[in-house]
Image: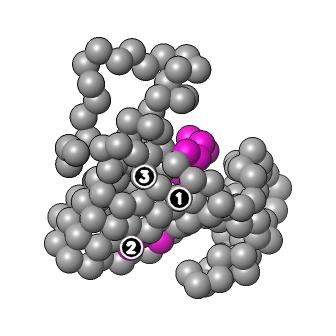
């Protein structure tokens, strides 16, 4: 069994075949890409938010806006999205495939065991061993943003988020 995250050259991934083939290929290679592959995700509805905990083993490539990087080993990423930006996520456990919103979360909690390369807007880092990071919304300096967040890593369902952008949503 190969340890690398490479795909056979003779398999074409497109349309509905991609939806069926990509999880199988990444699972066999012991890797994942944004929750597709050897991963599990738990979606928890919360007060004003949707909390997504993404667990991955092996090589985990992260392309989520605001959380780009690569982990080799084990990782847990928790994304907190405003309720309005993640309405399609169904509560519960999702195995091998989850379709994350293509927006930057208002908060991120990342834990990695092994080798972790982060290329986030807030930091670029290479960690070996254990790493733990919490990042709040990366808002433009001229944004009129009001956010109140209560988050407990052990109890994501108790998360409370009050979030508004004065130029888009009245507070």
User: Does residue 125 appear to the left or right of 31 in the view shown?
Assistant: left
Q: Residues within 10 Å of mark 3 (few under 14, many from 20)?
A: many
From the top left corner, tell me how far across and down residue 158 is, in percent: 73, 80
Based on the displayed image, in which of its 4 quarters is residue 83 positioned? bottom right
Disc 2: which residue: 111
Foreground pick, 44 / 4: 4
From the top left corner, tell me how far across and down residue 108 is, in percent: 50, 66
Foreground pick, 141 / 12: 12
From the top left corner, tell me how far across and down residue 75 is, in percent: 38, 66
Q: Nearer the viewer, mark 3 or mark 2?
A: 3
Label 2: element kind: strand
Q: Residue furthest right?
A: 170
Lower sequence index among marks 2 and 1: 1
Range of residues picked out in magenta: 97-111
Label 3: element kind: loop
> Can residue 103 be found in the magenta stretch?
yes
Question: What secondary structure is the magenta-colored segment mainly?
Answer: loop
Foreground pick, 22 / 157: 22
Identify which residue is drawn at 65% across, 60% down: 93
Figure disc tally: 3
């Amino acid at each position: 069994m190969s340890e690398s995250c490479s795909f056979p050259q003779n398999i074409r991934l497109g349309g509905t075949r991609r939806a069926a083939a990509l999880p199988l290929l990444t699972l066999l290679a012991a890797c994942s890409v944004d929750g597709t592959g050897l991963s599990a995700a738990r979606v928890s509805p919360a007060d004003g938010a949707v909390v997504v905990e993404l667990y991955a083993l092996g090589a985990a490539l992260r392309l989520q806006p605001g959380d780009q990087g690569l982990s080799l080993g084990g990782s847990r990423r928790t994304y907190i999205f405003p309720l309005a930006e993640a309405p399609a996520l169904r509560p519960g456990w999702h195995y091998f495939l989850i379709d994350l919103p293509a927006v930057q979360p208002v908060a991120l909690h990342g834990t990695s065991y092994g080798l972790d390369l982060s290329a986030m807007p807030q930091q670029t880092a290479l960690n070996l061993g254990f790493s733990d990071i919490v990042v709040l919304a990366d808002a433009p300096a001229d944004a009129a943003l009001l956010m109140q967040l209560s988050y407990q890593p052990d109890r994501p369902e108790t998360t409370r988020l009050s979030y508004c952008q004065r130029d888009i949503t009245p507070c």
